[in-house]
Image (cartoon, helix red, strand yellow):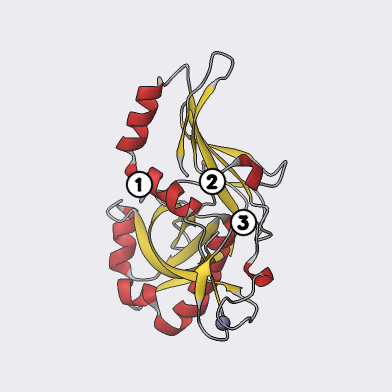
């Protein structure tokens, strides 16, 4: 399904198309700039899932010839992969009764499909992803010995070339707190005197120091009581921390 639409004389962009626009709810499209002259268009599918997914990548024809656009995409396999994986082969429906799986058709929710084997109503098959993120420190509160970092931002290609929608980020943030209480990932990584003191989803757009943070972004604040680690933060040796989280999401 992915393919190119090259700009004509009357149009301004080349498109690397991932899904048909007609599969999307009208008026749900949003555009996110990846870099100057290149943007990603996302929208909500008509399948009732409510998730935002990539529809196409736009290249400004004044900045990119068709060859340059193709070359850029080939040179950024992580982005190509991220949006193609997201566009997906359509995912699967699974039968909760007999375990039979069958391919999910776009626009036809699994719960309206009957199992080919036993006739039971199907469910959407849920995939699990492990998130392992390096979180750069965005803010340091010296007096309180607190560092604040952005874990995940919705619909933004991160350092690892991954993109997550707001819903997946919400699930990851929730699962992280749920799990971290049990397994103490941060403790294992840093030792005893480092504590997560805040983990939240930005309810509105706001500024964190000089960084614009948009609604739905997962933010974490960590208190560093350990003297050695705190010295590394202060002298700039430690610029961030890593966290692991697990998200379950529905393949579209
Ligand atoms: Zn069945």
Across and down, in percent, residue 120 comes to: 63, 82
Q: Which mark is residue 51?
A: 3
| In this rendering, position of residue 66 left or right of residue 57 | left
- Please name the residue shown 63% across and 51% down the image: 215
- Please name the residue shown 37% across and 48% down the image: 159
Looking at the image, which is closer to me, 119 or 4? Answer: 119
The CB of the residue at mark 1 lies under 8 Å from ligand 1: no
For mark 2, give the secondary structure.
strand
Q: Which mark is residue 132?
A: none
Mark 3 burial class by Cα count in 10 Å: few <14, some 14-19, many 20+: some
Residue 23 position (above or below residue 135): above
Q: Residue furthest front?
A: 117
Estimate the spatial distance between the alpha carbons at disc 1 and disc 2, rounded to whole Å: 14 Å
Residue 209 position (above or below residue 233): above
Q: Which mark is residue 54?
A: 2
- Residue 197 can be seen, yes or no: no
Ligand 1, what quadrant?
bottom right
Residue 229 in which image quadrant: bottom left
Estimate the spatial distance between the alpha carbons at disc 2 and disc 3, rounded to whole Å: 10 Å
Estimate the spatial distance between the alpha carbons at disc 1 and disc 3, rounded to whole Å: 21 Å
For mark 3, give the secondary structure.
loop
The number of callouts visible is: 3
Residue 119 in which image quadrant: bottom right
Looking at the image, which is closer to me, 220 or 70? Answer: 70
Look at mark 1 in the image and give the residue it sits on. Answer: 78
Across and down, in percent, residue 178 comes to: 52, 78
Looking at the image, which is closer to me, 44 or 222? Answer: 44
Looking at the image, which is closer to me, 1 or 184? Answer: 1
């Amino acid at each position: 399904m992915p393919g190119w639409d090259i700009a004509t004389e009357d149009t301004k962009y080349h498109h690397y198309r991932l899904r048909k626009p007609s599969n999307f709810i009208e008026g749900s499209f949003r555009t996110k700039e990846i870099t100057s002259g290149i943007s990603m268009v996302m929208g909500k599918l008509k399948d009732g899932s409510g998730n935002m997914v990539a529809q196409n990548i736009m290249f400004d024809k004044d900045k990119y010839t068709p060859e340059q656009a193709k070359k850029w995409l080939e040179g950024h396999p992580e982005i190509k992969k991220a949006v193609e994986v997201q566009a997906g082969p359509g995912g699967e429906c699974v039968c909760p009764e007999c375990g039979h799986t069958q391919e999910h058709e776009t626009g036809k929710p699994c719960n309206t499909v009957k199992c080919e084997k036993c006739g039971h109503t199907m469910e959407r098959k849920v995939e699990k992803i492990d998130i392992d993120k390096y979180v750069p420190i965005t803010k340091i509160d010296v007096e309180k010995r607190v560092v604040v970092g952005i874990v995940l931002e919705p619909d933004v290609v991160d350092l690892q070339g991954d993109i997550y929608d707001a819903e997946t980020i919400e699930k990851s943030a929730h699962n992280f707190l749920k799990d971290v209480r049990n397994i103490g990932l941060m403790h294992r990584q840093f030792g005893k005197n480092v504590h997560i003191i805040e983990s939240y989803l930005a309810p509105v757009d706001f500024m964190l120091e000089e960084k614009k943070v948009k609604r739905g972004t997962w933010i974490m604040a960590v208190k560093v009581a350990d003297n050695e680690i705190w010295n590394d933060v202060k002298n700039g040796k430690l610029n961030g921390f890593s966290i692991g989280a697990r998200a379950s999401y529905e393949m579209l």
